[in-house]
Amino acid sequence: MKKFLSIENLTILGIILGILVGIYIPELALNLKILGDIFLNLLKMIVIPLIFVSIFVSISTLSSANDFKDLGIKAFLYYLATTTIAVITGLLVANIFPFSISDINLSSNSVDIKKLTFESFINNLIPSNIFESFAEGKSIHVIIFSILLAIAVLYIKQEKKQLIVNLFDGLNDAFLLIAKWIIYLSPIGVFALISSIVAEKGIKVIIDLWQYVLIVLIGIIWHFAVNLGLIAYLVGKVNPVEYFNKVKEAILVAFSTCSSSATLPVSLEVAEKEAKIPKKVAGFVLPLGATINMDGTALYEAVAALFIAHVFGIELSLLQQIIVVITSTLASIGAAAIPSAGLITMTLVFSSVGLPLEGIALIVAVDRFLDMFRTSTNVWGDLIGAKVISRFIK
Ligand code: ASP
């Protein structure tokens, strides 16, 4: 009985009940939304402090700057390889099952589409005021600052170094404990989030865009189960099903919050405590991965590009599809780890191959639904990354 009532099972129950209540008693769902907001706020409250200290602890417990280089290069190679595989999977699925929709109402939705340029993307990487970055929750800035600080600390006098490392290490444990307390609330939080989303959006929109939804889902599920499963098995030398069972709470929270960043406290907790991944690997690979490694997002952006090309009757050549692979990968790196971020960076992909940006308005209705699946895949990719990389770090 106790095993059955585990937090993971209760969270699954929360998702199922959330869908039912969202469909059949939408007024109740909307009234309970506040519970979901509280849960989400608690996760967001802890995430920036956690990113700051966990990256610091991870790097400062490495024995030298060279070890950091080693960890960084391996993590980066993993992110790049898996994201590229994800995009190619998306393009293959969309080419194998070509779209055949022709009667979409182009004026059905409107979105405020701002174009993202490559320059602003690069420029935005460097923080000019770190306190502002903390206050605004800009995780990439916090990561960069934390890496710099940790490398600097590697070079200062041993006794001072030890003092700072101990302080951060203690904070890290305390923050993870807070994360654990928040996880106890996840069945209720997840229930409230899912039911209010279903109540707000309805499920009819999914039916209207079923072909697009189906192809994104086939691609995402394939990448989640087959590609990442094989990578876990062959490279990480771990049984993916067993590993999934250890970390599934993070996947469920990702599914319901649609935010890799809000899920990070949970991912760190399960990776370190359940899957026993060393702190120095999990503490670096997970926060960085939550911010830049988004397989699900990249795959979805590529399929969206092909879908919009189809709707507007534009034929994408092989070269253009290769450009889609590159820009979708970049766009997923640039996407913030928050709900619907992928929709914004998608402008980068569209403009690289001359697709009309208004096309985004067509798919916005199902974005939140697909976000659940792509965020789960993003987080699963990070967690497998932590496992794989821990095998290759001394
Ligand atoms: N919601 C996604 C995440 O946080 C990003 C996106 O694809 O919109 O991982």
Image (tube, rainbow, N blue to C red):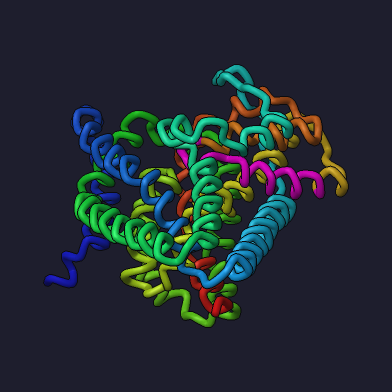
Whether residue 242 is visible here, answered yes or no, is: yes
Residue 102, x across and y down, in percent: 69, 31
Which residue sits at x=43%, y=46%?
Answer: 261
Left or right? Give the position of 255 relative to 7: right
Residue 292, x across and y down, in percent: 58, 49
Which of the pair 39/51 is nearer the observer?
A: 51
Which of the pair 69/87 is nearer the observer?
A: 69
Q: Quadrant of residue 334?
A: top right
Which residue sits at x=29%, y=60%?
Answer: 170
Residue 150, x across and y down, in percent: 50, 56
User: Is residue 38 placed above or below 4 in the rendered structure?
Assistant: above
Which residue sits at x=63%, y=27%?
Answer: 104
Quarter that holds the N terminus: bottom left
Per the image, is 25 magenta? no
Left or right? Give the position of 249 relative to 223: left
Whether residue 381 is visible here, answered yes or no, is: no
- Our reading of the magenta stretch's main secondary structure is helix
User: Is residue 35 placed above or below 332 in the rendered structure?
Assistant: above
Outermost left residue: 1
Quarter that holds the C terminus: bottom right
Which of the pair 118/319 is nearer the observer?
A: 118
User: Is residue 271 placed above or below 108 in the rendered structure?
Assistant: below
Which residue sits at x=46%, y=54%?
Answer: 376
Counting every numbered tag in the picture gives: 0
User: Is residue 209 placed above or below 227 in the rendered structure?
Assistant: above
Magenta segment: 322-340
Residue 225, x across and y down, in percent: 52, 66
Q: Quadrant of residue 48?
A: top left
Per the image, is 328 magenta? yes
